Amino acid sequence: MQIVQSIDALRQTLAGRGRPAFVPTMGNLHEGHLSLVRHAREHGDVTVASIFVNRLQFLPHEDFDSYPRTFEADCAALQAQGCDVVFAPKELDLYPQPQTFKVQPNPELADILEGHFRPGFFTGVCTVVMKLFACVFGTTGGGVAVFGKKDYQQLLVIRHMVQQFALPVQIIGMDTERAADGLALSSRNAYLSAEQRTQACALYAQLQWLAGQVQGNGAVPLEQLEAQAVERLSALGWAPDYLSVRQRDDLQRPAAGAAPSPLVVLGAARLGSTRLIDNLEF
């Protein structure tokens, strides 16, 4: 496995090696990330993972400085999964000048849910992903990028970005990896205390409850069911931002009386100081 830091070194490393399959990460890797790498190996000639904590997608009060950085362990884990190349740029490698050109996603998709509570988040995500795609695929003629569905809205935003810019990148979304009690694997789970960890599966449990209520109580307004789910989670000591039922393809609210469409319920809530997100398709 090769570890490269600069964009030029990455392009030289990938030259002549065929179609890349790429997994972008911010490091502090867990089994969810590693499952993406294993899947990527099936879809390309050379498997590439990036490790870069992207300042542009953190709000000023968020955890950029304290975000867990475990580079040596991450590289060992990636090597064990058969990753071929790790792109680990420093901030000045990826942003040698202030990144004044940015990708502004469609506000109808990006300013709701996560984008409402974290304004500017998806601009930061799209900008870094666009730049990483240019680094990895710029001289290879395209390839595959693999993302997890845990960041459901992010996956949809990136799909739309790739479509609108006609990028030669196939986006593959993989199901969320979970612990035995249902908790979605996340780097931020490391912030949870032992007691909080036992309580953390409650977010997914409430998403399951809400999906079941929607399927079984068609006469009850969605907003009422969502409010009940928020109350139930709040009663367990959480501080929910949202638990919301949306259409899978555009994350808009289902129209009353319209033909049924595939749905997803999404949630974000704080347990102590740790903010967790999750979702469930149904």
Image (cartoon, rainbow, N blue to C red):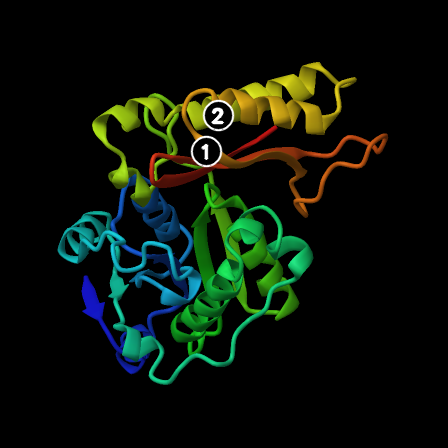
Q: Earlier in the sequence, mark 1 or mark 2?
A: 2
**Which residue corresponds to the image point at 47% horizontal and 36% vertical from the top-left?**
278
- 232 shown above or below 3: above
Q: Which residue is mark 1?
A: 239
- Say whether marks 1 and 2 touch (CB < 8 Å): yes
Q: Amino acid at mark 1?
A: Ala
Residue 27 placement (x, y as % from top left): 27, 54
Q: Position of residue 29 (x, y in %)?
A: 26, 48
Question: Which amino acid is tagged 2?
Answer: Ser
Mark 2 lies on residue: 234
Q: Neighbour class for label 2 at 10 Å: few (<14), some, many (≥20)? A: some
Where does residue 149 sit, x and y in percent of width and height? 48, 42
Q: From mark 1 to mark 2, how far is it between C-alphas?
A: 6 Å
> Residue 195 appears in which quarter of the rendering?
top left
Front residue of this view, candidates 65 and 234: 234
Does any portion of residue 15 appear in the rendered image?
A: no
Q: Which mark is residue 86?
A: none
Q: Secondary structure at mark 1?
A: strand
Query: Is 155 placed above or below 137 here?
Result: above
CA neighbours of label 1 inside 10 A, class few (<14), some (14 to 19), many (20+): some
Question: Farthest top residue?
Answer: 216
Direction bottom: furthest residue: 97
| Residue drawn at the location 50% of the way across and 54% of the way down | 118
- In terms of image quadrants, where is residue 1? bottom left
Indicate the secondary structure of the residue bearing disc 2. helix
Left or right: where 40 falls relative to 259: left
* On screen, residue 162 above or below 221: below
What is the x, y in percent for residue 164?
Answer: 65, 67
Give the quarter of the figure containing the C terminus. top right
Of residues 271 and 280, the one nearer the viewer is 271
- Residue at 38% across, 52% down: 40
